[in-house]
Image (cartoon, rainbow, N blue to C red):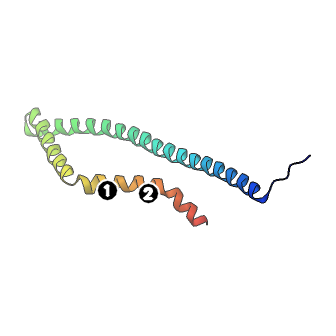
Amino acid sequence: MEETKTPVEVLLDQVGIYAKTSLKLFRFKATDKVAGLFSDIVSGTVFGVILILIFVNLNIGIALLVGDLIGKMYWGFLSISGFYICLGLLIYLFRDRWIKQPVSNLIIRRLLDDEQTDEQKL
C-alpha cells in the first residue's frame, strides 16, 4: 500500500532539500572566494619577487654610477641606502593611509563582489 504524505511532510521535505542546496551553494561560493584570494596572493607574490630582483639590480647599478661620479664606490652605496632610509620612514609614517586602508578595501571589495552581483541579478 502506498503511503501518502501530508502537505506538512512534503513541505518539511522541501525545506530539507532547500537547506542542503543552500549549504552546498554557500560552500561553493566560499571555495571560490578563497581560491580567488589565494590566487591573487600567489600571483602578487611572484610579481613582487620579480620586481624585487629588478630593483636590486637597478639599485646596484645606480649605486655604482653614483660612486663613480663621486669618486668613492662606498659613497654611492651609502647615498642610495640613505635615500631608502628616508623613503622607509616616509612609508612608515603614512602606512595606514597608503597601505593598510587600500589593502583592506581591496580584500573587502573582493569578498563582497559576488554578493553585490547576486543582489543586482534579483
Residue at coordinates 85% horizontally, 52% vertically from top-left?
Answer: 4
Q: Is residue 112 above or below residue 83?
A: below
The circle on residue 45 is: none
Residue at label 2? Answer: 109
| Corner quadrant of residue 76 | top left
Q: Position of residue 6 (x, y in %)?
A: 80, 57
State the residue in front, 23 or 41. Answer: 23
Amino acid type for the residue under numbered disc 1 = Gln
Label 1 with label 2: CB-CB less than 8 Å:
no
Q: Position of residue 113 (x, y in %)?
A: 50, 57
Count the labels in the image: 2
Q: Is residue 49 left or right of residue 20?
A: left
| Corner quadrant of residue 42 | top left
State the residue in front, 34 or 43. Answer: 34
| Corner quadrant of residue 101 | bottom left
Q: Is residue 8 left or right of residue 36?
A: right
Q: Position of residue 65 (x, y in %)?
A: 17, 38
Q: Position of residue 99 (x, y in %)?
A: 29, 52
* Secondary structure category for the residue under label 1: helix
Residue at coordinates 15% horizontally, 44% vertically from top-left?
Answer: 85
Q: Is residue 104 left or right of residue 2?
A: left
Residue at coordinates 57% horizontally, 50% vertically from top-left?
Answer: 26
Mark 1 neighbour density, 10 Å: few (under 14) some (14–19) many (20 or more): few
CA gap between label 1 and label 2 equals: 12 Å
* Secondary structure category for the residue under label 2: helix
The circle on residue 101 is: 1
Residue at coordinates 71% horizontally, 54% vertically from top-left?
Answer: 12
